[in-house]
């Protein structure tokens, strides 16, 4: 990458010296030479340039809705604002299986098969809706499909959300600030 800088310097026309008509009291600023980037920095720059626009926010393929939800809750963009002190517990019914995803204060996100003890909300997702949610390439697509099936249920394609705790309590615990949590139960408000 440094050869580009050298070539650029050769191609630039040489600056003509300024006439000394300026007052002597004004001092010219010293220009520090720009250090050449290290090999690691230049490699990182080249890699960043090679990624096509809009591809950075894609969601990787997942076999199950559990894996996709856990991935989304661990992603720094989709779970922006999810802090260590937040806690939640959501129970899902999807693909004929009951599972829950939760997080204890200062804990990690966990998922288990079975019924949750004290869930904040119960979410039922039809099999056809699950397959379309798994095919969503970005969080925006996932959100659009999720809200579509929540608002307008079709035969075999639906999402039903039942809040089991007061919304004001859930908002204090982060549901209003975290994009994924806001999506998952926010539509129930």
Image (spheres, grey):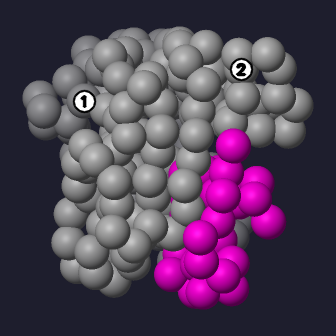
Please give the name of the residue rendered at 20% of the width and 24% of the height, measured from the top-left corner: 43
Q: Is residue 117 visible?
A: yes
Q: Secondary structure at mark 2?
A: loop
Residue 185 drawn at (x, y percent): 64, 57
Mark whose residue sits in front, 2 or 1: 2
Residue 140 position by quadrant: top right
Relative vertical location of residue 102 with respect to residue 137 in this rendering, above or below: below
Residue named by callout 1? 44
Spatial CA span between label 2 and label 1: 44 Å
Please give the name of the residue rendered at 33% of the width and 83% of the height, measured from the top-left corner: 85
Choose between 103 and 94: the one closer to the eye.
94
Residue 174 drawn at (x, y percent): 53, 75
- Please check the rendered image and state whether residue 153 is part of the magenta-colored stretch, yes or no: no
Which of the image's four quarters has the N terminus? top left
Please give the name of the residue rendered at 69% of the width and 78% of the height, measured from the top-left corner: 167
Label annotation for residue 157: 2
Query: Is 162 left or right of 51, judged from the image as shown?
Result: right
- Please check the rendered image and state whether residue 165 is part of the magenta-colored stretch, yes or no: yes
In magenta, the rendered stretch is: 160-189
Q: Earlier in the sequence, mark 2 or mark 1?
A: 1
Residue 55 drawn at (x, y percent): 50, 19
Q: Secondary structure at mark 1?
A: helix
């Amino acid at each position: 990458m440094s050869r580009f800088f050298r070539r650029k310097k050769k191609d630039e026309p040489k600056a003509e010296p300024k006439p000394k008509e300026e007052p002597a009291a004004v001092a010219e600023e010293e220009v520090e030479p720009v250090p050449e980037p290290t090999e690691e920095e230049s490699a990182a720059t080249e890699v960043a340039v090679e990624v096509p626009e809009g591809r950075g926010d894609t969601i990787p393929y997942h076999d199950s809705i559990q894996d996709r939800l856990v991935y989304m809750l661990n992603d720094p963009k989709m779970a922006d604002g999810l802090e260590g002190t937040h806690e939640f517990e959501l129970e899902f019914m999807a693909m004929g299986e009951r599972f829950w995803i939760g997080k204890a204060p200062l804990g990690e996100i966990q998922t288990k098969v079975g019924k949750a003890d004290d869930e904040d909300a119960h979410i039922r997702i039809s099999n056809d809706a699950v397959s379309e949610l798994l095919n969503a390439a970005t969080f925006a697509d996932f959100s659009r499909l999720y809200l579509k099936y929540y608002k307008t249920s079709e035969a075999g394609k639906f999402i039903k959300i039942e809040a089991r705790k007061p919304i004001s309590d859930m908002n204090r615990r982060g549901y209003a600030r975290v994009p994924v949590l806001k999506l998952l139960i926010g539509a129930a408000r």
